[in-house]
Image (tube, coloured by chain):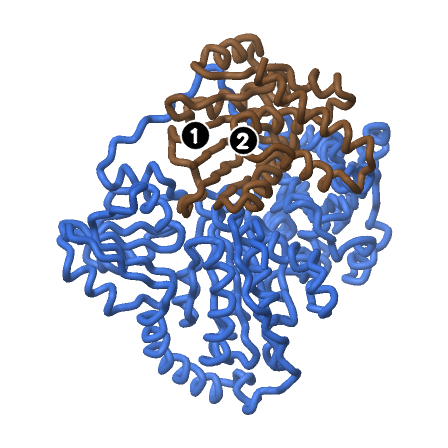
């Protein structure tokens, strides 16, 4: 069993929260994990990427070899496209369609069209899905939900992690994030 | 004990706590910051009363750690690679004084300069000072090496370096902890005289340090971190250091590398093992994360040795980080080229929306517009992003504190106006001493302190300058009439322009402090 996942976005969008949840679930499941993150200057609104590797065997490299990703998850469309060429044959791309326009931005429809043209892709408005369950800020939990559809973890693992992570912020926040997780998973199954 | 999922930095920090440190000394700097942050957040560290407050700069950190070592306790000191330049005086001399309690210096190098001004390789410093150096291959080794480092430091009575690189520092992996060691009791060195580096004593100490070099090599020869892996195909041998080993293994998913491998993670070089590799293999590929430190030694001073392949021969790029693809290519593999869509745009870092520095730069640009470019000296922090469009507001960024010293030199040369732009934390790190120079000569220049009440670029660590900058400036002798403050908010723009214009026009030394909390730390407090 091996899962090599690239998570991409813009500094501040919360890809490290997604990576941390999957990483915790994997350690609890007895898997080896490597999770390479970007800290420092790039976090100031720049393009950020995390490499997340899960395996039942020892993992050596902290970085996923070029063209070796089983999943590329982009919480922003251009950042998803930036790493699309890292997909392994048969790999899946998951992307949010909502752009972060802190640069001169091309037509977002053109980017989304390129993402949808990939052999295996799930491209949707994750901000809108999050809004429907109660809070657009839960977008990263929607994307986590979509990602879990590609991972073989026992049912309920991520629900428990969300309860644990958001417990201090109150039951309402927990509920919103649980709904976001479920809605993201449903978006993949559609 | 359950496994932990820790960054390389955090694994090292946990290792240091478990190895019984009594203090951690550091100044924030990517990619080393998370070591100290982990210790600051640790309940165990708090219960034990482990020292964990930030130091004003790396030199202070190094010397404070040496002081703790003098008093018999184990001390950890952490910095980024360029921080060791700041700490170099104390560092090199600590090898000559030697240590009493164990002293491990962690230096996190940043090849590819993700968040740095150069990609200097700290292994040169370890060799220069004549001390042992560890370079972990993975997070678990980082954890284990802290124990080994303290043990070696105390047994040999020298400081020991532990060199990290960005990818390991900022990547998480499973960590298995060991049983914790107790902290050391307070004690003084049996021969405290050796800490007095008068020439007569320093000469003896230095001879003593040189005599230990052979022991350090013997330690490296038997180190479990240095490994020989057999391979039948001796047409090529492979030498790896630190995390380069991982990229090599990644090229052989079935773990069937046909070539002999020498994995080096403890220095000075294990000479016997190195000789074996060179004697048994026709050619040797050297994989190093960082500078061609070993490769250059193997080539020697007379030009390239055709037996050796690496960064200096074009087998690998001369600069930057390694990755699995580059190592595969060096092994002669085809690597799929990276194909980017023409729709992609660069997305460099930028000042955050609502950042107080934006208002400060807008006001400064308006005041300096009649003077044209080439009047603003700055240095290291979030405010360095003011060099990028749309601001293009600063003309230099050299090192911590160089805004004030370089502005002074330019003012000495006759440049008018000369403005130094410096952050609050950088000001206390390295701005005070050059400001004293400017006070002494009443240099006609303006120091513009962008006080966001934190160390912003590294993620919002406490700044020792908090609430003290006016007092510090006045205490150093700046005329209080020319220590002004302003509030960097859009609605204050006209007022801010007026204050800056007055002080920049003043024909002596002035300090203008723009004070407003970092938008990131403010948001975190609210959520």
Q: Position of residue B167 (x, y in %)?
A: 48, 46
Q: Chain of mark 2?
A: A
- Give the residue displayed 73% in from the left and 29% down from the top: A177
Camera-side residue of B188 and B257: B257
From the image, state the color of chain A: brown
Q: How far apart are the alpha carbons under marks 1 and 2?
A: 10 Å
Q: Position of residue B248 (x, y in %)?
A: 32, 46
Q: Is residue B339 left or right of residue A42?
A: left
Q: Is residue B161 left or right of residue B75?
A: left
Q: Tag on residue A7? A: 2
Q: Give the mark nearest the N terminus, 1 or 2.
A: 2
- Give the residue displayed 75% in from the left and 50% down from the top: B508
Q: Which chain is blue?
A: B
Quadrant where the N terminus of chain B is found in the figure: bottom right
Residue B235 seen = yes
The residue singled out by tag 1 in the image is A69
Query: Considering the numbered disc 2 on the image, is that residue within a helix, a strand or a loop?
Result: strand
Q: Position of residue B174 (x, y in %)?
A: 52, 51
């Amino acid at each position: 069993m091996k899962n090599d996942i690239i998570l991409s976005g813009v500094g501040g969008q919360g890809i490290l929260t997604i990576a941390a949840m999957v990483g915790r679930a994997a350690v609890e499941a007895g898997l080896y994990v490597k999770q390479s993150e970007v800290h420092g200057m790039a976090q100031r609104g720049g393009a950020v990427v995390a490499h997340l590797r899960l395996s039942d065997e020892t993992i050596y490299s902290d970085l996923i070899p070029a063209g070796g990703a089983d999943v590329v998850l982009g919480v922003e469309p251009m950042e998803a496209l930036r790493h699309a060429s890292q997909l392994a044959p048969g790999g899946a791309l998951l992307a949010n369609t909502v752009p972060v326009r802190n640069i001169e931005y091309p037509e977002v429809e053109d980017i989304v069209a390129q993402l949808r043209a990939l052999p295996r892709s799930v491209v949707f408005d994750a901000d809108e899905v999050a809004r429907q369950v109660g809070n657009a800020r839960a977008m990263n939990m929607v994307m986590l939900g979509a990602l879990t559809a590609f991972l073989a973890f026992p049912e309920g693992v991520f629900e428990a992690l969300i309860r644990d992570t958001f417990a201090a912020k109150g039951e309402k926040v927990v509920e919103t994030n649980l709904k976001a997780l479920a809605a993201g998973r449903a978006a993949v199954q559609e | 004990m359950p496994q932990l999922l820790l960054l390389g930095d955090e694994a090292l920090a946990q290792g240091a706590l478990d190895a019984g440190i009594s203090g951690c000394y550091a100044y924030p700097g990517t990619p080393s910051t998370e070591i100290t942050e982990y210790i600051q957040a640790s309940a165990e560290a708090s219960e034990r009363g482990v020292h964990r407050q930030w130091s004003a700069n790396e030199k202070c950190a190094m010397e404070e750690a040496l002081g703790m070592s003098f008093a018999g306790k184990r001390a950890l000191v952490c910095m980024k690679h360029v921080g060791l330049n700041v700490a170099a005086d104390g560092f090199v001399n600590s090898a000559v004084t030697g240590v009493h309690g164990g002293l491990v210096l962690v230096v996190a190098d940043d090849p590819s300069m993700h968040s740095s001004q150069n990609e200097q390789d700290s292994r040169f410093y370890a060799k220069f000072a004549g001390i042992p150096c560890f370079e972990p291959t993975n997070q678990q080794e980082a954890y284990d090496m802290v124990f080994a480092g303290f043990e070696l430091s105390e047994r040999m009575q020298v400081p020991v370096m532990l060199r990290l690189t960005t990818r390991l520092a900022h990547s998480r992996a499973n960590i298995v902890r060991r049983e914790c060691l107790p902290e050391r009791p307070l004690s003084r060195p049996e021969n405290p005289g050796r800490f007095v580096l008068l020439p007569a004593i320093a000469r003896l100490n230095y001879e003593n340090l040189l005599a230990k070099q052979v022991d350090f090599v013997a330690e490296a020869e038997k180190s479990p971190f240095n490994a020989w892996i057999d391979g039948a195909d001796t047409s090529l041998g492979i030498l790896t250091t630190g995390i380069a080993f991982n990229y090599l293994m990644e090229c052989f998913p079935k773990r069937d590398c046909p070539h002999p491998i020498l994995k080096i993670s403890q220095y000075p070089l294990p000479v016997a093992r190195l000789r074996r590799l060179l004697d048994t293999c026709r050619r040797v590929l050297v994989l190093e994360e960082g500078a061609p430190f070993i490769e250059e030694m193997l080539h020697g001073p007379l030009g390239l040795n055709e037996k050796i392949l690496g960064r200096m021969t074009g087998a690998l790029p001369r600069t930057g980080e390694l990755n699995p693809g580059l190592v595969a290519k060096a092994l002669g593999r085809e690597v799929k080229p990276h194909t980017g869509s023409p729709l992609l745009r660069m997305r460099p870092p930028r000042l955050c929306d609502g950042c107080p520095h934006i208002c400060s730069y807008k006001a400064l640009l308006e005041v300096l517009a009649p003077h044209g470019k080439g009047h603003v000296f700055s240095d290291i922090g979030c405010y360095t992003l003011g060099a990028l469009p749309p601001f293009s507001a600063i003309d230099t960024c050299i090192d911590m504190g160089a805004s004030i010293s370089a502005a002074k030199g330019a003012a000495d040369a006759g440049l008018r106006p000369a403005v130094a732009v410096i952050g609050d934390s950088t000001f206390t790190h390295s701005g005070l001493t050059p400001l004293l120079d400017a006070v002494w000569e009443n240099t006609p220049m303006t120091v513009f302190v962008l006080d966001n009440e934190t160390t912003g670029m590294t993620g919002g660590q406490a700044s020792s300058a908090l609430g003290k900058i006016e007092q510090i400036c006045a205490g150093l002798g700046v005329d209080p009439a020319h220590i002004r403050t302003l509030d960097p908010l859009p609605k204050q723009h006209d007022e801010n322009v007026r204050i800056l214009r007055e002080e920049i026009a003043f024909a002596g030394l002035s300090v203008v402090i723009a004070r407003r909390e970092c938008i990131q730390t403010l948001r975190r407090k609210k959520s």
